[in-house]
Image (cartoon, grey):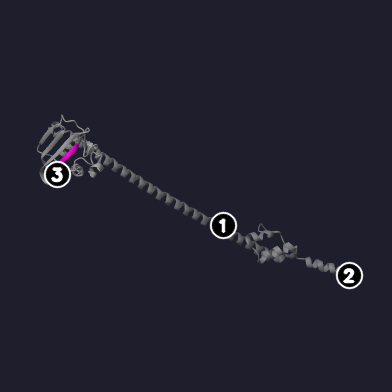
């Protein structure tokens, strides 16, 4: 009996001043310490004692473990908040950088669009100017051709397509050809000889770079065309279809060819002659 009482007295004495460990410290369950990566120190001691259901010294609990664990929890929370804030700032800076890059790309694209629009507008203006210039040149040429004296002289001569070989009419007519010569090389008058189907026209003292020279051309009316049979400029004579074509082409290059854009048809045939 005395032995049993002694055992109870010892057990009661051992419980004096000892307290159970609370399940929560600083608002955090001890079971969740891992969420803040707390694995040692006072918090680990508390978590172990709580998990085992052990009582601990009340004095040590209140004066050491609980304050130390609470401070560790707050420190971990502050570190977590700092990391989160740094992550937020890094994400914010990255998003700002991306936004800046997108804005720079948009501005580059806008500048490129403006440059391309300005270049297109410049090309369009140049195209219009060139078209207007060509149209003005054609208008002036038509006016000058209409005033050519040779048209009055040949008023009774039928105006048919010019040809360099049989059956190969060009887009340029006889009178247009002679008027172009007059516009390009002003002369001192004409000698015209018309016999049956043959027409010979001589432009006297035509003004050319080599001086004042006569230009003589003979045409034959055949198959509803005036075929150029003979062409002479000063001492230069073109007898073959090829030579006549080349000489006529050179004569037309300045005053008309490239302005009225009339082309020679049957060029290949003329060259083969």
Q: Quadrant of residue 51?
A: bottom right
Q: In terms of secondary structure, where does tag 2 sit?
A: helix
Please state, as top left, top right, bottom left or bottom right, where the C terminus lies in the image.
Answer: top left
Question: Which marked residue is nearer to the observer: mark 2 or mark 1?
Answer: 1
Instruction: Give, as a single range, the part of the protein colored magenta.
Output: 227-232
Query: Residue 89: where, in percent of width, then height?
Result: 52, 56
Q: Residue at coordinates 82% horizontally, 69% vertically from top-left?
A: 10
Residue that mark 1 sits on: 84
Please state, as top left, top right, bottom left or bottom right, where the N terminus lies in the image.
Answer: bottom right
Query: Residue 56: where, in percent of width, then height?
Result: 73, 65
Front residue of 101 and 231 = 231
Which mark is first along the chain, 1 or 2? Answer: 2
Question: Which marked residue is nearer to the observer: mark 3 or mark 1?
Answer: 3
Query: Residue 198: where, in percent of width, then height?
Result: 15, 34
Q: In terms of secondary structure, where does tag 3 sit?
A: strand
Q: Quadrant of residue 143?
A: top left
Query: Residue 200: where, in percent of width, then height?
Result: 13, 36
Residue neighbourhood size for the residue with mark 1, other residues' Cα within 10 Å, grouped as few (<14), some (14–19), many (≥20): few
Residue neighbourhood size for the residue with mark 2, other residues' Cα within 10 Å, grouped as few (<14), some (14–19), many (≥20): few
Question: Which marked residue is nearer to the observer: mark 3 or mark 2?
Answer: 3
Front residue of 240 and 86 = 240
Which mark is first along the chain, 1 or 3? Answer: 1
Q: Quadrant of residue 257?
A: top left
Q: Left or right: 93 with respect to 12?
A: left
Residue that mark 3 sits on: 237
Mark 2 → mark 1, Cα distance in angstroms: 65 Å
| Residue lying at the far right of the rendered structure | 1
Q: Residue at coordinates 43% horizontally, 51% vertically from top-left?
A: 105
Does the image show residue 175?
A: no
Q: Left or right: 226 with respect to 101?
A: left
Does the image show residue 217?
A: yes
Residue that mark 2 sits on: 2
């Amino acid at each position: 009996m005395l032995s049993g009482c002694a055992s109870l007295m010892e057990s009661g004495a051992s419980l004096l001043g000892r307290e159970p460990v609370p399940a929560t410290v600083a608002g955090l369950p001890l079971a969740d310490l891992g969420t803040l990566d707390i694995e040692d120190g006072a918090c680990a001691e508390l978590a172990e004692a709580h998990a085992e259901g052990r009582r601990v010294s009340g004095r040590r609990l209140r004066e050491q473990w609980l304050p130390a664990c609470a401070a560790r929890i707050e420190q971990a929370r502050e570190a977590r908040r700092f990391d989160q804030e740094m992550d937020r700032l890094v994400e914010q800076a990255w998003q700002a950088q991306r936004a800046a890059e997108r804005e720079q790309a948009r501005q580059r694209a806008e500048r490129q669009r403006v440059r391309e629009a300005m270049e297109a507008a410049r090309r369009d203006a140049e195209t219009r100017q060139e078209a207007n210039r060509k149209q003005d040149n054609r208008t002036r040429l038509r006016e000058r051709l209409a005033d050519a004296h040779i048209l009055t002289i040949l008023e009774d001569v039928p105006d048919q397509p010019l040809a360099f070989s049989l059956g190969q009419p060009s887009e340029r007519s006889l009178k247009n050809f002679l008027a172009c010569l007059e516009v390009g090389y002003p002369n001192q008058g004409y000698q015209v000889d018309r016999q049956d189907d043959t027409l010979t026209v001589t432009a006297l003292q035509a003004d050319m770079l080599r001086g004042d020279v006569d230009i003589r051309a003979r045409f034959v009316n055949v198959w509803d065309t005036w075929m150029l049979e003979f062409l002479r400029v000063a001492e230069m004579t073109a007898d073959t279809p090829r030579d006549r074509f080349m000489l006529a082409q050179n004569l037309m290059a300045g005053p008309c060819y490239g302005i009225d854009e009339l082309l020679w048809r049957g060029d290949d045939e003329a060259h083969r002659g």
